[in-house]
Image: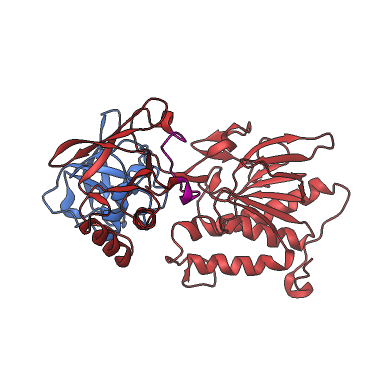
């Protein structure tokens, strides 16, 4: 069991800055994020995009902002549970929250701060009828272990780097047959990977179906065939053991929606006094919260985090007085 | 302040004729959001999420901007893509777009 003072759900900019502000008050933090790295959207969606509205930075790349926030938080030794999704919470006898992830990792804290941004990033699922029946029965959205596909017939869908890279990898003596289905002629992704795929197709080592998309799944209990709608050739049947649709990630609110929090339009309602939710001990900060006048800006998330930790401190130590100390006077004293 | 009229057909098939300012650096995604139409605009307009995927039903007299590689790439990851598919966030509102008709794509 991981014990901390503030359990932060979401390791994006807002969650990371919370570690710093909490650290100044001698509160320890632990962050949980469904993504395998810290940084949230900034790291996952647009690390190379510039941001122009961070005070004192006329321009900073999203990825660099994350690096600096990590550096700023480092003295306070935050813990991380990455690649796991916060799944359920219960309160124990002492009024502390026990939070369990989808992989069963347990965390305990008196305070939870939800800094979940847009929610958890989950694979984008194509709108194919009865698709869910075949999930884990031949349809996988993430390749966990390529060995799983040894000697199998595999169809991959998508036109991005992950579709190209896995096609190249699985075609190299792993799967018995690899077919890549893509909506249009052109591929994005790294030119080297594109060339490799085209070479494999020319050599007859993979089947490349461009201008097509998978529209149907078949099989008794386990996937055994796909229907591909082709622009010029009509419907094509493909016998296969596996289908791996790789269409990127999109955010979903996820299990948080079931935590009895007041939610409007996919955002958690908070009191602007301290960004507390309707559940005592749970706060929500950054893009995931909503209140009259809310602006989804990193800047505003930082402000919310700063006020939130003050309230969290008073909740943890109701009898202690808190005096605002300036870092310029006191420096940053890590743990 | 100059305005044009843009028609947005929502997912229930209802047409909304919106007055759109052309001097506020606004795009179709933002126009929909400002009218509280159900468009997420998750990525904020960077052509990185396809939550503003829409169809151009009737082009305005002026031609729409060509699809950038970023937009084309993102449409690869979207579903229900048709020849007239665009990302609303990449359609900057301009004076010559009077009469543009846009239909919202299914969520997904």
Q: Which chain is blue?
A: B
The residue sitting at 32% across, 49% down in the picture is A158
Query: Which stretch appears magenta?
Result: A135-148
Viewer-closest of A311 and B105:
B105
Viewer-closest of A160 and B50:
A160
Q: Is residue A189 above or below residue A223?
A: below
Where does residue A135 sit, x and y in percent of width and height?
A: 44, 34
Residue B84 seen in this snapshot: yes
Helix, strand or loop for the magenta stretch, by majority: loop
The residue sitting at 42% across, 65% down in the picture is A49
- Is A329 on the left-hand or right-hand side of A226? right
Number of numbered tags placed on the structure image: 0
Position of the C terminus of chain A by quadrant: bottom right
Viewer-closest of A298 and A10:
A10
Residue B104 seen in this snapshot: no
Q: Colour of chain A?
A: red
The residue sitting at 48% across, 65% down in the picture is A62
């Amino acid at each position: 069991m991981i014990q901390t003072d503030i359990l932060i759900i979401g390791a994006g900019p807002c969650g990371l800055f919370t570690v710093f502000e909490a650290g100044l008050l001698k509160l320890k933090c632990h962050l949980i994020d469904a993504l395998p790295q810290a940084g949230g959207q900034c790291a996952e969606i647009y690390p190379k995009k510039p941001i122009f509205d961070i005070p004192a930075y006329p321009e900073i790349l999203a990825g660099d902002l994350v690096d600096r926030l990590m550096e700023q938080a480092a003295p306070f030794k935050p813990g991380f549970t990455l690649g796991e999704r916060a799944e359920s919470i219960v309160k124990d006898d002492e009024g502390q929250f026990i939070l369990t992830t989808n992989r069963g990792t347990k965390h305990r804290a008196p305070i939870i701060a939800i800094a979940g941004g847009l929610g958890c990033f989950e694979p984008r699922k194509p709108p194919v009828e009865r698709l869910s029946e075949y999930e884990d029965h031949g349809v996988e959205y993430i390749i966990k272990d390529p060995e799983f596909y040894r000697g199998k017939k595999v169809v991959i869908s998508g036109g991005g780097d992950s579709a190209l890279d896995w096609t190249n990898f699985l075609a190299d003596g792993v799967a018995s047959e690899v077919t890549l289905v893509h909506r249009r002629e052109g591929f994005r992704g790294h030119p080297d990977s594109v060339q490799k795929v085209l070479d494999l197709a020319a050599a007859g080592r993979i089947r490349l179906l461009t201008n097509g998309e998978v529209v149907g799944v078949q099989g008794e209990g386990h996937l055994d065939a796909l229907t591909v709608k082709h622009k010029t050739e009509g419907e094509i049947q493909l016998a296969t053991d596996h289908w791996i649709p790789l269409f990127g990630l999109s955010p979903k609110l996820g299990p948080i929606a079931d935590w009895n929090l007041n939610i409007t339009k996919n955002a958690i309602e908070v009191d602007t006094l301290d960004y507390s939710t309707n559940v005592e001990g749970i706060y929500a900060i950054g893009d995931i919260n909503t209140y009259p006048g809310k602006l989804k800006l990193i800047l505003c998330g930082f402000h919310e985090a700063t006020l939130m930790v003050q309230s969290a401190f008073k909740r943890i130590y109701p009898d202690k007085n808190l005096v605002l100390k300036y870092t310029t006077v006191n420096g940053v004293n890590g743990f | 302040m100059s305005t044009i009229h843009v028609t947005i057909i929502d997912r229930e098939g209802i047409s909304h004729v919106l007055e759109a300012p052309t001097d506020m650096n606004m795009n179709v995604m933002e126009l929909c959001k400002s009218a509280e139409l159900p468009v997420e605009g998750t990525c904020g307009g960077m052509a990185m999420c396809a939550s503003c995927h829409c169809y151009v039903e009737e082009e305005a007299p002026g031609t729409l901007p060509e699809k950038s590689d970023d937009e084309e790439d993102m449409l690869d990851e979207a579903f229900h893509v048709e020849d007239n598919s665009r990302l609303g966030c990449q359609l900057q509102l301009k004076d010559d777009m009077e009469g543009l008709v846009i239909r919202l794509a299914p969520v997904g």
